[in-house]
Image: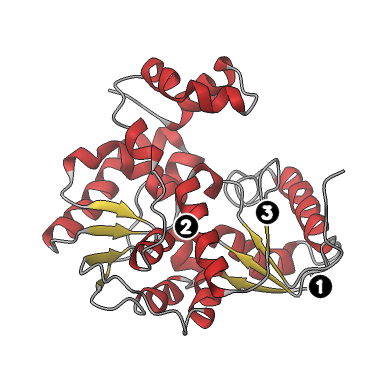
């Protein structure tokens, strides 16, 4: 049986989709370790807040089941605070859980968005390398809904010599792709191109966003843009001279087809017990090739 602490001060819930971007996860955990706080990171498996099933896809019963299981897993650790990395999770915990499921979800802990938590904790950690970059901070759809990007802005403002432009409230096309893929094919290009043009006209070095759907929507077209994608944890750890973790999405999107991608990632997915058929099915949903 794996070790489980009887009680922890802080639990960082990584969500179910952020794990697809391990370089972001590792950067975030590095920052947390540098703050000197004690925490347990929770994620993986089938742990999910239910947002992709309920509000996004209308699968109410599945969303309820996922919510029950996640809250039970968190309560088992008896945390004082649960730190959320996903704006969708944050909405579920702070809004929908209390409105839709109050009869069976007992949250015996405080909930806080990761950017607010870090903003309050890294006051004494002064970045020792200034990126001297211009970035556009993009509000994803769910960031707009929950207003968490205000904390992203405050957090990034701690980095000296970083010029931050607050982007317009515009969808990247990723959410429609998840919920109504046929519709997204017709309108997604317009969303993405508008967002890309804004960043290029501002001569930004980075488009900064932690939303996983945004990055999935934009990565396939990065060769059309003059900027790079960056998430706040990676940008912060870079400024602290922390370890730079490989962003495998950038390398995978350079593949010409799924067969090439399979061969490039075979060692990784086989070590994790996945079959080629399973990976091929997942990749065909996430990656599209012309």
Within 10 angstroms of label 3, few (less than 14), some, or many (20 or more) residues? Answer: many
For label 2, the residue is 27
Q: Distance between the residues labelled 2 and 3?
A: 23 Å
The mark closer to the camera, 2 or 1, is: 2
SS class of the residue under badge 1? loop
Quadrant occupied by the N terminus? top right
Q: In this view, does 128 lie to the left or right of 132?
A: right
Q: Decide which of 155, 60 is in the foreground and name it.
A: 155
| Mark nearer the N terminus (1 vs 3) | 3
Figure check: 202 above or below 16: below
For label 3, the residue is 49
Q: Position of residue 55 (x, y in %)?
A: 61, 52
For label 1, the residue is 108
Identified at 32% across, 41% down, the residue is: 219
| Mark nearer the N terminus (2 vs 1) | 2
Q: Position of residue 178 (x, y in %)?
A: 49, 41
Q: How far apart are marks 1 and 3 (CA)?
A: 16 Å
Q: Decide which of 148, 243 is in the foreground and name it.
A: 243
Within 10 angstroms of label 2, few (less than 14), some, or many (20 or more) residues? Answer: many
Quadrant occupied by the C terminus? top left
Q: Where is residue 271 in the image (x, y as percent from the top left)?
A: 60, 26
């Amino acid at each position: 049986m794996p070790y489980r602490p009887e009680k922890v001060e802080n639990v960082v819930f990584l969500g179910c989709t952020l794990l697809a971007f391990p370089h972001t996860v590792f950067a975030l955990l590095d920052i947390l370790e540098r703050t000197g706080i004690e925490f347990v990171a929770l994620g993986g498996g089938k742990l999910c807040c239910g947002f992709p099933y309920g509000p996004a896809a209308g699968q109410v019963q599945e969303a309820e089941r996922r919510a029950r299981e996640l809250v039970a897993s968190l309560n088992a650790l008896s945390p004082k605070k649960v730190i959320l990395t996903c704006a969708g999770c944050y909405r579920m915990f702070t809004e929908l859980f209390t409105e839709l499921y109050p009869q069976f979800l007992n949250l015996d802990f405080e909930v806080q968005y990761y950017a607010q938590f870090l903003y309050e904790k890294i006051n004494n950690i002064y970045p020792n390398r200034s990126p001297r970059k211009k970035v556009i901070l993009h509000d994803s759809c769910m960031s707009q809904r929950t207003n968490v990007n205000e904390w992203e802005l405050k957090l990034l403002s701690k980095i000296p010599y970083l010029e931050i432009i607050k982007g317009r409230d515009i969808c990247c096309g990723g959410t429609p792709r998840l919920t109504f893929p046929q519709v997204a094919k017709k309108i997604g290009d317009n969303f993405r191109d508008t967002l890309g043009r804004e960043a290029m006209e501002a001569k930004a070095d980075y488009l900064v966003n932690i939303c996983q759907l945004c990055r999935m929507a934009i990565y396939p077209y990065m060769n059309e843009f003059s900027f790079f994608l960056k998430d706040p944890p990676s940008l912060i750890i870079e400024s602290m001279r922390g370890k730079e973790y490989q962003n495998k999405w950038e390398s995978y999107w350079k593949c010409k087809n799924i067969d090439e991608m399979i061969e490039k990632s075979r060692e990784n997915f086989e070590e994790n017990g996945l079959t080629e058929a399973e990976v091929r099915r997942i990749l065909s949903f996430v990656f599209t090739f012309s």
